[in-house]
Every structure is written in C-alpha cells, then in structure tokens.
Image (tube, coloured by chain):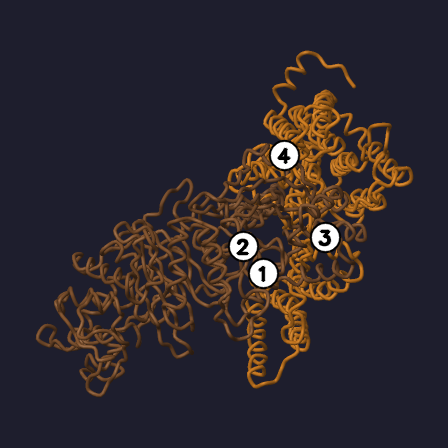
C-alpha cells in the first residue's frame, strides 16, 4: 500500500490536539499555582492546627513588694464542631456536672455565636475550675474534638484598690479589629492599670503547631516542635501604691462618697488613690463577672466611677494658694499687702461672705483663716489692672496660663484610663457668656475662691499640694513605679516647673503651716510632723458643701502630699482635715493600734444619707457578709491577708 | 521465538529508539518516587520497604524493566501472527473476569492470584491495539464501506462492552480514544469534528441550564446561535457557496432584528418559537438551494450536520437526566462548576486543587507536602498521584511532567509515521491514542477541568497492572519500530 500523504497530514491534527490540551493544562496550572494564592492558605488551614499557649499575665506588687494581684489557672473547654464524633452526652454532662438542658442550651448558644464556624475552635464552656478540669482530663479521650485550654484568672490578695487595679475581660470585636494581637476569646485589661499597662502585662502568646490529617486526628508536632513558640510571661508591675495606706484610706472613706489622693511629692508617685464607694476587685473575675458588672453599673452610687481621677469638683478654698502665687508673681500684691474683710468681700452690691477674723489682713493670715475677701480683692485688682494687661480678657488669659502651668485645666497624664481634665475657663468662654468686653473681675469673682466655673479632680488638688511641697514643680503623678524588665517609664519621670517664681512658694507654705498651727486645719496638727494644709468647703448645686482638705508633710522635707474630698460632708475641717491627718500619720508614722481605732471611728461616720445599695456600696459591707473578704483583716493587720 | 545471531542483536541496539526508552525510565522512576512521597508517613522511612506502596512499585518497576527487555527480544512477526488469537484470548479473559473477580469497591475487574492481583482490562489494551493493527494491515483492507467500518468498530467496542460489564467504566472509555486511529486511517474528519461539537454542545447546554433567557434555558440559546454560526461558516468556508451563505446570513440577521424589535416593543419572544422555525426554514432553503449549487454533496452534509445538531441538543438534556446515574451527574455538574459539593463529590477535586495550588511556583519540596501526606486527597498514590507532584514540585515540576508526556506522545506519532508498514503505524497510533486519553482525563480531573473518571496516570500511578500494561504497549512498539528497516512497504 502506498503511503497516503493526504492522510499523513492528519498526524498534525492528532499531534495538534495533544499540544493544545497540554497548553490548556499549563494555563490552568499557572492559574492554580502561580496566580491564585488562596489554595496555599487552604492547605495550611487543612493541615496545621495552631494551638495558642497563653502566657502568664504580669503580677502586680505594691511599693513595699507585697503581692497584690496574681494568677491562678482556669480552664476553658473548647471544641472544633467538625471534629466532634458522636459521644456519650450523659457521661459528658455528669463529668462537667451540668444538666442535659444546660448542655443543649450551651450547644445552641455556641452555634448562634457570631464567629461560629464548624471548622474552628469554639468555646463550649469557660471558667472551669481545676477540679472540673481534673475530672474531665481523665475522660477526655472519650470526647474527640473537645480539648481544654488553660487560661488565667486574676486573684487579689487584698480587697482594695479596685479602681487602680482594674480588671480584665474578654476582648470584643473592636479590640480584635484594633489590635492584631487579639483573637476571639482572649482577655484584655478593661479598667485601671490592667488596661493602661495591658501591653506589658499581657506578655506574648505562644503557639504550638500541630499536624492534623484528613480525619482530624492530630499526628504530631509540626517539624518536631521546632516552629512552636513558647509564650513569654507578662512583665510584673511594681505599684507606687502603699497597699496598707490604700486599705486604710478606703476604710476611712467607708460610708462616704469622695476620694483621697496621696502623692510622694519628689517622685510624683501616688501612694494611695482612694475612690469611694468602691468594691472588691475579685467581683470582676470568674463566672460571676457579668452579673456583678451589671450590678456595679446599675448602682446609683457609681462605684465603678473612679472619683479620684474622673470626678471634677469645685476645688473651693484649696484653690486659694494658687491665687496667692499668681498675685505675688504678677506683682498685684506683696506679702505685706493688706485687704479689708468685713465679714466678707463687699463691693458694688455684691457680697462674698467670710467669717470672723481681723481686718485688714495680709496674705499669710489670709491663707491661715481662709479669707475669701482677700483673694476676691486680689483677683478683682488683677482682672481690672488695665494699665498692665490692657483688658480684663487679657488679664484673665494670663491668670489662666498660670493655672495651666500648675496642672489645672488639662489632664495631668496619670497612667490610668479615664482621667478627667477638670475645667479652667478662658477668655473666649466668658466672652461667649457675657459678650466680649462686657465682663470684669467682679463678674467672675467666684473663680478667685475656687468656685464658679472652676473644676478640678482630687488628683489635681493633690498635685497642687505636691507642687507647693516641692516649691514650684511636680512630677507627672503615676501609680506604677516600675515595670519589671523594662524599668521606669520616661513619662513617669517628667518634671513640670510652674511659671511662678520659686521664691513665692515659701510664703504660701508658711501660710499653709499657719493654717494648721492656728487656722482652719488645726485638726491636722500632728506633733513632730510639721503638717502644712489648706481646707476647702466647696459649695455645689447638689446639696451640702463638699468637705475638702489639701496638705503635705513634713513642711521642710515633704514626704507625702494629700487631697481629701468628701462629697456633701460640710466644712473642710469636719471630714477633710481629720481624714487627711490620719492618712499623713498612717504613712509617716506607720500603723498603730491607736491609729486603727481612730480610723474605725472615722469609718463609722457615714455621710451617705440615701438608701444604700446592697453588695457593692463599700468594702465594709462586703466584709460583714463574707468572712473571707479581707476588708476586716486589712484593717486589723496592716492590710495584709494572713 | 527464533534464534538471533550477534549481528542482529547489535542491530537491535542501534535501531531501537533510545529516546523513548529514556523517557520511559525517567517517568517510571519519577513515578515510584512520587508514590513514596504520596504515601510517606512521618514515622516510616525506607523508600524500598516492600510492605509500603513505594517499595512495591519499585518491585513492579524492576519487573517491568525485565518485561520490557524481554519484549524487545521477541520478533515482531510473532505479534502479527498471534494478534487475533491474543485478542480472542483477552476477550475471553475479560468475560471470565466478570464472573470470577471478587467485588472490589463495586468493580469486578481484578483477578486475584494469591498476593498478586492483576487487571486484565489493562492488558486488553495491547491486544486490541494489535488486533486493530492486524486488521488494517490485512492485504486489501481499507476503511471503506460499512462492512469494514463495522469490523474495525467491532474490534474496539467488544472490549468496551466486556469492561463495562466489569463495572470499570473509566477504563472502558479509554478505548473510545481509538477514534484517533480510525481518523488517521481515513475516517472522515467530520466524525471527529462531530464528536468535538457533541462535547461542546453538552458542556454549553448543561453549564448554562439554570439561567433562563428568552423563556428557555440560556444554554439552549447559546447552542442555537452556535448552530446558526456553524451553518453560515460551513457554507462559506467548506462548501464555498457564497450565495447560499450570504442569503442564510441575511436571513438570520433579519430574523434577529425582528426578534429584537419585538422585544423592544414589549412582546416577549419565546426562544424555541424563534430559533426552531428560523433554523428549520434556513435548512429547507438549503435543501432547495443545493439543487442549484455545484457543491451539492457538501451542502447536504452541512444541512444534515445542522439537523443532527438540533436533535442532539434536545437529547442531551434528556439523556443527562435520565440515562446517567446520579453520581455520574454530580461528577459532571461539579466539573462544570454547576454544583459545589465540597464535602461529597467535589471533595476529591477540591482537595486536589488545594494540593496543587498550594505548591506554588517551585513547590513545598520533596516529602514536605501537607495535603497529600496527611491524606486529604483520597487515592493520592493512584489516580491522584499528579497532585503530589503539584504540591511538592510546584508549577515547575507539574509542567515538566506534562512536557515529558507530550514529548513521549509526539515521539510515538513520529515513530508511527516513519514506519512504512501499516501494522506498525496503526499500532503506534493506538499507543499514542491511549496515552492521549489517559493524560487528558487523568490530569484534567486532578486540576478540575474534567469530570472524575478513575483512570491512572501512565507510569506514575501506583499499580503493577497499569505499569505493566503500558510497558507491554510501549516495548512491543519499540521492537516493531526497531525492525522498521526489515519491512518495506507492502
């Protein structure tokens, strides 16, 4: 048979066919292997199971190295629905000591969750105790697809300082969005330093990479564990808080609403930061957290509201030293300048009342007696001194800038969340109210004595006290002294000098010393401690005057500056001064039976008149109910739990 | 077997096609190594452990080298002489197998001899190829007349029927690739074209069955338009009847414009009511027109082709829903992307795509594949062996394998055409056709372009029968080719 060349050409069709097929397949491979990267991720999520190993959260110590917050293990029972095979639910329920109904309920709840997926880890039950875990662990092999993740639970050695310590909570969607570190089910700081020092406390999560085959069975550690990452424990914190002083302060404030702030002037370290009413920090952990949290939020006394740094109060007469400093610095007065006081400031039909003392008087006695008239006159002269400032508006701006340099009107920058900035008005503010140029010193005379529009936090008042103690500067107040392994944060060493000439401070200090020796705060005259102080009786629209005290000691080597603010408690001398004195004495002289007795006496003096809300009003109420709540012991044994 | 002298042996060494042998060796060794990678377990080590798949495959490979070498020593006249008896024996063996074979995953295709199982269907390929070659080389035979067609097609269809009885549909389908051989030996190209169009219609109709357009499935609309385009194209390019082509085209455009106008006027035109009359009218016009046309026969073919297309279109839907079994329907739907059944029928292919896709450009490295190691891909050492290569050797390795096969197939076509004997040529084309089918379907399935049909990748997939079957095919070809100088044209 001759070769048919026409037919031989058909080899091109057949050859062409397979060449075309191979080309199509190569294009497909380019698409699968080179262009589309999703398959890689699929393969990894198929094969690798990443199990998170949670680090231990940083521990918290007080300034004297007493352990305040520590961790105990807690367990979450998690599951990957896809990997669960039918199991003996009755056995399961018995092991976990839950009812069948609860089991079904949890299962349903889990499925309803927003991030539910049958292929990823779902939390079936949290807050398992070590006992639950022990029981479960023996039988774990019977429940494939379930496993246990160890978590940490915060434990508190003292039932105090809840406002400082804060709490931790499970992260929400927003946290996860804002910070790549978090995955659903993680914990993060919610309030207090748990929140502000979260980045140091949380440590670094570790992970183990396991290999899983198609049936879901874990085969081995990937790469023999070479790619596993060990968790790094969080940094421990050392508080500047003296936990004994803090506990004592909280005891003193029982039955009262308000705050105590104690600062070590030289370092800006906060020794005690009491907000009252407060609560036992352990309420906000573990199984009951959600319910307790709701109770605290709904409590009409707002225990979650940290009055020491969040509340903005009229500072009242504790504001007067700032006025004296400004008038001296601006040359409005000298120490020998005298102003009249006829039971108050009386001018052009306006009267700001005062109490009986000699008249006319110079600056130091005016501080000693807390003379309203003196500071009103000084303020009026400054505001109306057109020869120097041109207008009241300009004078007020100068005044305001001095206030700001003394730490008022803006946040001080404490290392805790939620600080309030208080309020110092400016010229524009009054221009808006009264019209530009249509107000003079007299119009806003209340500002002179810390009333009117002026608002300050107890922290700012304590900071003023520290500034005066330091004769003209303050260090940013802070509650964390040191981060283990990191050191002191630069921010917490920042020195702020006021724009007042330092030499004027000694006059103010002397005036405040005189107030203690023979003026409004004689109650704070503790022999040998050279206390300087200033009372305040702040008028407010909510009822009785607030009782305020600001002071420091010893006069020439200040170790503690304090502000006490008791809402609706009357004269500064009634509550503010004795509480402040006790705090100073407790800190400088240490604990003593006498001090405890006096402290208990103060604790029994309640100013809250409206009905108490149970459970969370104050640590004291807790203590009555529950023997293990350390409040009683705190009092009796210098704040340490034995 | 006749005794050869030294001279002939030297001759054989010189004339045998070493290029093919080298390709074969590379593929078999690469295949066994891939099987090792596919079945590698983190606790097991040796590649040659006989209790493991890779060890067994190396044993099969060693034996197949022996078989291949022995086959080279057998004179080609033996094959020619015993082609029919061998074919008859294999058909008998296939039938016997149906009855004696144990049920293995629903298939009755394995003959079990103690520890060894063999699949006669793999060896029947060789016998069928030899029989077909013998038929075509019979003196005076040419692919003309229904009788000769019937004999040739009968030789192909007989094993298909037997293997379907064994419930090995995939293997049975391999024989349909011999249509390439018939085509090469003179069958009209129209049959091939029609087969291609049948596949295209099938895919189009099913793929777009769910969307409705003009009141009928979109797939049908597209198919109708394709038929119309084909008619015009064939008239213009194949029949070279400019006038008929032009008139039909004008007719279609006018009809289309009217339909469009009605649609704009708010009258909805039903697809069937529009396309069927238009196409049938155009065909009637062609029947009339061909009387005046010089290319009468070609126009008639065009008309018949178009009419057959219409019939086919209406049968496809019916056949798909009523003839195919549900699991086969699902496989096809998954391939066409109509259904996504990642837990069921789509699982294999999806996991296999993940395995290949995760390989990236250069792969994860030998033994580092996670998809295949952890048994996410079922049948990874047999039908899905290509995804182990895809995952561990990446795009580079995957393409290399494709190129190896392409080189082998093109080489075999070259061998076929350089032989002057019909027997050698037909046999070589049979081998090439089998390889084309296996390559197209197996790799197409692994990369998700073809439905899942369980046939192995030659030389790579685990299994002695498949490897030996292809070794037989290839080495008989090599021996026949080596003797090409001794057999002139006749």
Q: Which mark's residue is nearer the viewer, 1 or 4?
A: 1
Chain letter for the brown part: A
Distance from disc 1 to disc 3, alpha carbons, whole Å, reads 64 Å
Q: Which mark's residue is nearer the viewer, 2 or 4?
A: 2
Distance from disc 1 to disc 2, alpha carbons, whole Å, reads 9 Å
Q: Which residue is mark 2?
A: A159
Assess disc 2: are there few (<14), some (14-19) or many (≥20) residues with their C-alpha within 10 Å of its C-alpha: many
Q: Which residue is mark 4?
A: B412
Distance from disc 3 to disc 4, alpha carbons, whole Å, reads 36 Å
Assess disc 4: are there few (<14), some (14-19) or many (≥20) residues with their C-alpha within 10 Å of its C-alpha: many
Assess disc 3: are there few (<14), some (14-19) or many (≥20) residues with their C-alpha within 10 Å of its C-alpha: many
Distance from disc 1 to disc 4, alpha carbons, whole Å, reads 93 Å
Which callout, 3 or 4, points at the residue further toward the start of the chain? Answer: 3
Helix, strand or loop at mark 1: helix
Which residue is painted at 30% across and 64% down in the image? A534
Q: Is residue A191 visible?
A: no
- The reply to whether callout 1 and callout 2 are in contact (CB within 8 Å) is yes
According to the rendering, which colour does chain B have? Answer: orange
């Amino acid at each position: 048979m001759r070769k048919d060349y026409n037919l031989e050409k058909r080899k091109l069709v057949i050859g062409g066919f397979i060449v075309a097929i191979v080309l199509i397949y190569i294009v497909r491979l380019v698409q699968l292997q080179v262009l589309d990267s999703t398959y890689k991720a699929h393969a990894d999520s198929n094969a690798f199971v990443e199990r998170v190993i949670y680090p231990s959260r940083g521990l918290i110590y007080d300034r004297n190295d007493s352990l305040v917050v520590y961790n105990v293990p807690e367990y979450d029972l998690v599951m990957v629905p896809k990997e669960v095979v039918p199991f003996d639910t009755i056995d399961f329920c018995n092991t976990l000591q839950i009812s069948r109904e609860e089991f079904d309920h949890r299962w349903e709840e889990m499925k309803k969750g927003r991030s539910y997926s049958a292929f990823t880890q779902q939390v079936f039950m949290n807050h398992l105790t070590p006992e639950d875990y022990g029981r479960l662990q023996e039988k774990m092999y019977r429940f494939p697809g379930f496993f246990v993740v160890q978590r940490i639970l915060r434990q508190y050695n003292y039932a105090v300082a809840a406002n400082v310590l804060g709490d931790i909570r499970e992260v929400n969607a927003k946290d996860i969005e804002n910070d790549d570190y978090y995955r659903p089910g993680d914990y993060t700081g919610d309030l207090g330093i748990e929140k502000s020092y979260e980045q140091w406390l949380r440590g670094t999560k570790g992970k183990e990479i396991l290999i899983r085959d198609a049936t879901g069975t874990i085969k081995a550690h990937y790469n023999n564990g070479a790619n596993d990452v060990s968790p790094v424990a969080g940094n421990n914190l050392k508080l500047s808080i003296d936990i004994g002083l803090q506990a004592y302060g909280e005891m003193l404030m029982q039955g009262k609403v308000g705050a105590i702030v104690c600062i070590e002037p030289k370092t800006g370290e906060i020794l005690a930061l009491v907000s009252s009413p407060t609560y036992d920090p352990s309420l906000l952990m573990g199984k009951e957290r959600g319910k307790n949290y709701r109770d605290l939020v709904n409590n009409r006394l707002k225990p979650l509201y940290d009055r020491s740094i969040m509340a903005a109060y009229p500072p009242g007469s504790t504001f007067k030293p700032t006025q004296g400093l400004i008038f001296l610095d601006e040359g409005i007065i000298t120490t020998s300048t005298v102003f009249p006081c006829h039971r108050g400031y009386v001018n052009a039909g306006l009267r700001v009342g005062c109490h009986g003392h000699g008249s006319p008087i110079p600056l130091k006695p005016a501080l000693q007696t807390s003379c309203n008239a003196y500071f009103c006159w000084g303020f009026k002269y400054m505001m109306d001194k057109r020869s120097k400032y041109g207008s009241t508006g300009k004078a007020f701006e100068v005044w305001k800038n001095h206030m700001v340099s003394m730490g008022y009107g803006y946040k001080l920058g404490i290392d805790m969340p939620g600080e309030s900035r208080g309020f110092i008005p400016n010229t524009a503010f009054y221009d808006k109210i009264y019209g530009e140029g249509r107000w003079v010193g007299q119009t806003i005379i209340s500002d002179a004595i810390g009333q009117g529009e002026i608002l300050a936090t107890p922290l700012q008042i304590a900071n003023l006290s520290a500034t005066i103690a330091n004769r003209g500067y303050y260090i940013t107040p802070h509650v964390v002294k040191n981060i283990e392994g990191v050191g002191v944060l630069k921010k917490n060493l920042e020195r702020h000098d006021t724009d007042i000439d330092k030499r004027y401070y000694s006059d103010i200090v002397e005036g405040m010393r005189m107030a203690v020796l023979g003026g409004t705060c004689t109650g704070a005259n503790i022999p040998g401690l050279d206390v300087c102080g200033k009372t305040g009786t702040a008028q407010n629209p909510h009822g009785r005057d607030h009782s305020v005290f600001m002071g420091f000691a010893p006069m020439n080597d200040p170790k503690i500056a304090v502000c006490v603010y008791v809402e609706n408690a009357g004269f500064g001398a009634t509550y503010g001064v004795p509480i402040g004195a006790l705090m100073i004495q407790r800190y400088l002289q240490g604990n003593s039976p006498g001090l405890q007795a006096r402290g208990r006496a103060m604790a029994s003096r309640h100013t809250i008149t409206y009905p108490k809300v149970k459970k969370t009003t104050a640590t004291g109420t807790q203590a009555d109910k529950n023997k293990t709540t350390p409040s009683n012991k705190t009092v009796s044994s210098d704040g340490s739990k034995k | 077997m006749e005794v050869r002298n030294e001279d002939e042996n030297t001759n054989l060494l010189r004339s045998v096609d070493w290029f093919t042998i080298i390709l074969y060796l590379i593929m078999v060794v690469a295949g066994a190594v891939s099987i090792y990678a596919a079945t590698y377990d983190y606790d097991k080590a040796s590649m040659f452990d006989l209790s493991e798949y890779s060890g067994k495959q190396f044993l099969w490979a060693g034996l197949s080298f022996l078989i291949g070498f022995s086959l080279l020593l057998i004179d080609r006249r033996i094959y020619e002489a015993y082609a029919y008896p061998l074919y008859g024996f294999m058909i008998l063996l296939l039938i016997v197998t149906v009855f004696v074979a144990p049920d293995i995953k629903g298939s009755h295709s394995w003959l079990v001899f103690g520890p060894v199982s063999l699949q006669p269907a793999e060896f029947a390929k060789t016998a069928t190829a030899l029989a077909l070659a013998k038929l075509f080389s019979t003196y005076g035979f040419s692919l003309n007349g229904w009788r000769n067609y019937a004999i040739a097609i009968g030789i192909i269809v007989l094993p298909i029927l037997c293997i379907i009885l064994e419930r090995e549909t995939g293997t049975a389908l391999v024989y349909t690739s011999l249509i390439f051989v018939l085509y090469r030996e003179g069958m009209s190209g129209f049959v091939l074209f029609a087969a291609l169009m049948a596949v295209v219609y099938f895919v189009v109709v099913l793929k777009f069955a769910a969307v409705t357009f003009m009141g009928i499935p979109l797939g049908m609309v597209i198919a109708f338009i394709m038929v119309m385009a084909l008619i015009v194209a064939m008239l213009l390019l194949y029949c070279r009847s400019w006038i008929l082509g032009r008139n039909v085209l004008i007719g279609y455009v006018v009809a289309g414009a009217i339909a469009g106008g009605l649609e704009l006027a708010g009258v909805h035109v039903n697809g069937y009511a529009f396309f069927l009359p238009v196409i049938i009218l155009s065909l009637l016009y062609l029947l009339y027109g061909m009387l005046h046309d010089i290319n009468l026969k070609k126009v008639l073919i065009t008309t018949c082709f178009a009419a057959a297309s219409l019939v086919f279109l209406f049968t496809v839907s019916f056949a798909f829903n009523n003839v195919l079994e549900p699991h086969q329907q699902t496989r096809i739907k998954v391939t066409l992307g109509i259904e996504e059944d990642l837990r069921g029928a789509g699982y294999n292919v999806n996991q296999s795509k993940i395995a290949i896709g995760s390989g990236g450009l250069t792969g994860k490295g030998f033994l580092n594949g996670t998809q295949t190691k952890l048994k996410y891909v079922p049948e990874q050492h047999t039908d899905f062996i290509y995804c182990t290569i895809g995952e561990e050797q990446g795009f580079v390795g995957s393409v290399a394998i494709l190129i190896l096969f392409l080189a082998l197939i093109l080489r075999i076509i070259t061998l076929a055409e350089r032989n002057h004997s019909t027997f050698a040529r037909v046999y070589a084309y049979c081998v090439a056709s089998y390889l084309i089918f296996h390559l197209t379907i197996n790799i197409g399935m692994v990369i998700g372009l073809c439905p899942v049909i369980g046939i192995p990748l030659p030389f790579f997939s685990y299994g002695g029968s498949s490897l030996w079957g292809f070794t037989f095919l290839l080495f008989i070809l090599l021996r026949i080719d080596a003797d090409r100088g001794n057999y002139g044209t006749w």
